[in-house]
Amino acid sequence: MAFGIAGPRVRLVPLDRQKHFDNCVRWMNDSEVIDGIAMVFPPISSDKETGFIDHLAKSESDTVFAIETLDGQHIGNSGIHQIDWRLGICKTGSLIGESEFRGQGIGTEAAHLRAFYCFEIVGLRILYSEFYPHNEASAKMQKSIGAEVWGVQPRANYKRGNYTDVIHTWLDRQMWRAHAPDWIKERLFPIKAD
């Protein structure tokens, strides 16, 4: 039986060690995948990824969803990290690990589902995220969901043999609702004016 938070093409489901682990290890060792995320020093061993998943199982400040197609294929992950429940803030990030699913708006769909979870289910106030200047897909996705750039951290990370800027964004509930697609409005909840 299917479960999770579903959109038209994908759904977010809890990360499951038996079902998703092998893909997570493979993606964390794929230079094309990690080029756009904060990770700097692969390779990642199975033991290290096991430690990360064990941490998630106990954490009250980190949640990672698997992104699956509606027929159950695991194609990526979407994370909510450093949750501060008192302030209602967190950091978010996603990856589409399977290359044939990139460039189709699936990351944006997953980001809308994640925003729905953060704002409408657990009541967070602000989602912070970041991307690198060379990651045009992340920049486009952030804009599509309503996120705005609040700053640029010069040469703050190391990618592609050089130090690179990190672009920081923020998103609140009203900004996201203004960009929510019709399928969110129609299927997940009726949006009413605040």
Image (cartoon, helix red, strand yellow):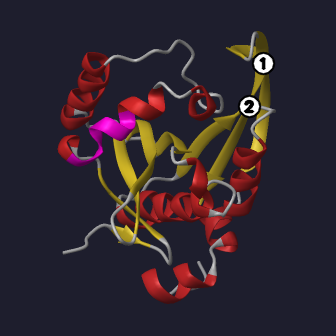
Above or below, comparing residue 107 to residue 137 in the picture: below
Q: Position of residue 145 (x, y in %)?
A: 67, 61
Magenta highlight range: 19-24
Q: Quadrant of residue 185?
A: bottom right
The 10 Å Cα crowd at callout 2, few under 14, some 14 to 19, many 20 or more, is many
The residue that mark 2 highlights is 132
> Does 23 lie within the magenta span?
yes
Neighbourhood count class around disc 1 (C-alpha, 10 Å): few under 14, some 14–19, many 20 upward: some
> Contact, CB < 8 Å: mark 1 with mark 2?
yes
Q: On screen, 20 above or below 115?
A: above
Amino acid on which disc 1 is placed: Thr
- What main secondary structure does the magenta stretch of the protein show? helix
Residue at left offset 75%, top offset 10%: 161
Judging by the rendered image, the residue that carries numbered circle 1 is 164
| Position in image of residue 53 (x %, y %) | 26, 31
Instruction: Looking at the image, tell me whether mark 1 or mark 2 is earlier in sequence order.
Output: 2
- Locate the C terminus by quadrant: bottom right
Q: Is residue 180 visible?
A: yes
